[in-house]
Amino acid sequence: MTRSQLPVLQRALSAHEATPTSRTAAHLADAPFRFGPPEHHAQPVPRPEGPGAHWAPAETLCELRLRGVKVVETTLGLRVRHAHRLPEVAAAVRAHADVVRLWLRLGRPAPEAGWDDGVALQAAWRRERFASPLAPVALRAGVTVTDWPRFVAQMEAAYAEGPTGPLADAVRRDLGDLFDRYAWVAEVPVRRPARALAA
């Protein structure tokens, strides 16, 4: 529907409300134009404030998902389609390019079980790229996971309970520590020293 069609539709609805038995508005009798009271509408999604460069990575991913923004990876980096219309989103993508690139490569994982976009990305990364390590895993200073299958089973059970579960803080902390420590190990390109020029 275009903007120019809205007044026509509003006039037709007004005519139908005034005289519902009129033949001119009879075709609107079964149309789904009845709006319920405000309590039946979905709750508004909180939007981040300020310029996009100051958004958190989770806020950036949430905006990309909710707005349906097209992001493409080019040889020059990530590019937001129609960036002139979405300057704050383009700034956020530039600020969090590594996280957005990983999110795109993992297939744009959507939040599940009520978690936010950041935790959903970390969980998708853990399932996809860090499924079964061969050696014991150093989770954080002083904590090493030796029984990985048991650790993953406990984490998945707590993750399924959602962000209001009793172990939600532990899931958030463990996923965050794994992600911060290991997510960028394979993503960072190897830097080779420049060859000395022959004289």
Image (cartoon, helix red, strand yellow):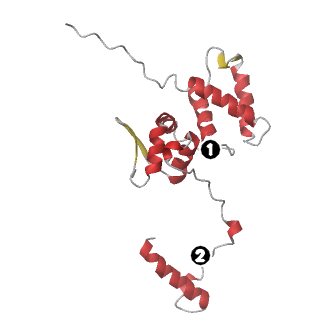
Mark 1, secondary structure of its residue: loop
The label shown at residue 169 is none
Q: Position of residue 24 (x, y in %)?
A: 52, 90
Going by the numbered disc 2, the residue's amino acid type is Phe
What is the quadrant of residue 178 in the picture? top right
Relative height, residue 9 to residue 175 (above, below): below
Residue located at (44% from left, 40% from top)? 94
Specify which label sits upstream in the sequence, 1 or 2: 2
Left or right: 72 with respect to 102?
left
The residue sitting at 51% across, 48% down in the picture is: 64
On the image, the x and y values in percent for residue 8 come to: 47, 81
Can residue 20 be seen here? The reply is no
The image shows residue 43 at horizontal and vertical percentages of 66, 59
The residue positioned 71% from the left and 67% from the top of the image is: 39
Q: Mark number for residue 111?
A: 1
Q: Which residue is mark 2?
A: 33
Q: Quadrant of residue 126?
A: top right
Which x, y percent locates residue 170?
Answer: 74, 31
Q: Is residue 66 visible?
A: yes
Which residue: 59% across, 75% down? 33
The image quadrant of residue 172 is: top right
Q: What's the CA distance linking mark 1 and mark 2?
A: 31 Å
Q: Amino acid at mark 1?
A: Pro
